[in-house]
Image (cartoon, rainbow, N blue to C red):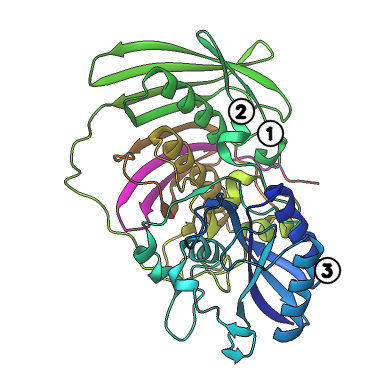
Amino acid sequence: MALSYVGIGSNLGDSATLLVAALEGLGRLGTIVAGSPVYETAPVGDVEQGAYLNAAVALETDFDPESLLGEMLSIERSHDRVRDVRWGPRTLDLDLLWYDGRTIDVPGLVVPHPEIRNRRFVLVPLTDIDPALGDTIGLYADALTAVDDQPMRRVTGPLHSNGIRWLVGLEDAIALARDGSTWTFSVHEDWANTSGDVFGAYAIAAALLCLRDVAPDMAPVSLVHRFLHGIPVGSTGSITIEVDRRSPRAIDATVSSVVAGKRVGRTNISAVASFPVLEERPEPPEVHGIASATPIDRLTQRLGFTIGASALNWRPLENWEVPDMADGDEPVVRLWSPNIALGSNDPYLVAAALLMPIDAGIWPAIMYNMDRLPDGPPVYTPTIELSAHFADLRSHDRFHLAEARIDHRTASAAFGAVRLWGMDGTYRAIGHSRNLVRAAYRG
């Protein structure tokens, strides 16, 4: 089978439904093995039209390039695609971007697609799937900086592992509603972990987004969250905020989350109006691409359970069998993020997104530390406490590298740290996690 990459776009009709229909059509041509989130993007060209929804998928197929293109055009026509205006609006647009590493230039088909490096709405989804992807010119990820001025906004979570729908994005998954001094939230199943509860960082994300309503002109600088009880999928909870200290330049608040009359967590958050300049910052490590790595969802399926969107937003940079191929023997797990907060100018949402690799990274780091990767039975590691410190997030909405390591482990607990860097190499945050370690396996 050949590995191909296909771009998907729509800006007419029910575009979200049409993109799902594209997944169904492409799934009949082979196996969708990976996919990017969906992005809202500006149209190309001078034709006046609405914004697009765009994504990309990796498709393993037995079709040769010309036949694959013919089938893709047939899918377009089945959804009333009309080609009467160049760069005009369309119900469904399918582009063959890359095919098995081959260079093809025949009438009606040029692969790799000649406009890949000029279009951010193509580059970002491709590098979401594989930052090591490229062609004879070089890596596509290296071309991102040149198109940073092209606006786009992420609107979903990553592609579900079943390849037939997109997971709900972070802000929609929390679904906050405010009534006076109380906020309510509903727990979405896409963000649950294997225990049936939501990931810990999900509850902290809700707390951050509530504080945004209280201090919208500030940005979070630190937090400590204490986990008291799990939050089951499908439940509805409430959040209240007690302001401990406030000035024009800073706020300290205690945020409490309650589900079914029981307090499930407490978060102490500090936000400031201006940030000091970081005098020292760790340099990001050299890493390998993920072209041959085992995606985190495939790993967990191999171990006997599934994982939620919180972890799926972060993918391992290295093969699980050798977690630190880049620079030594230290037990470090490194992950790469597909732009989870791309397009957001909201520092609270960016901070919430930055918390996700603390859940996604600490778990495999503990597993690796206990010699249970790649094939050992999973150890459930409930988080007791999580803390984080942030750099200034008001001008940075993209980040891509997380490094998780276990600093200390006893028979009953593990203490880990996660450091994060932005796509431009700037240091963004550090998180610390204290987890129970229990010999409780899925039987």
Q: Amino acid at mark 1?
A: His
Element under label 3? loop
Element under label 1? loop
- Asked whether the viewer can see residue 386, the reply is yes
- Residue 47 falls left or right of residue 301: left
> Is 422 one of the magenta-colored residues?
yes
Dot 2 and dot 1 residues touching (CB under 8 Å) = yes
* Picture layout, residue 43 above or below residue 118: above
Residue 365 % position (x, y)? 52, 53
* Picture layout, residue 214 above or below residue 191: above
Residue 168 % position (x, y)? 65, 42
Residue 180 % position (x, y)? 52, 8
Residue beneath disc 3: 28
Residue beneath disc 2: 175
Which label was assigned to residue 188?
Answer: 1
Between 391 and 27, the one lying in front of the other is 27
Q: Amino acid at mark 2?
A: Ala
Magenta-highlighted residues: 416-440
Element under label 2? loop
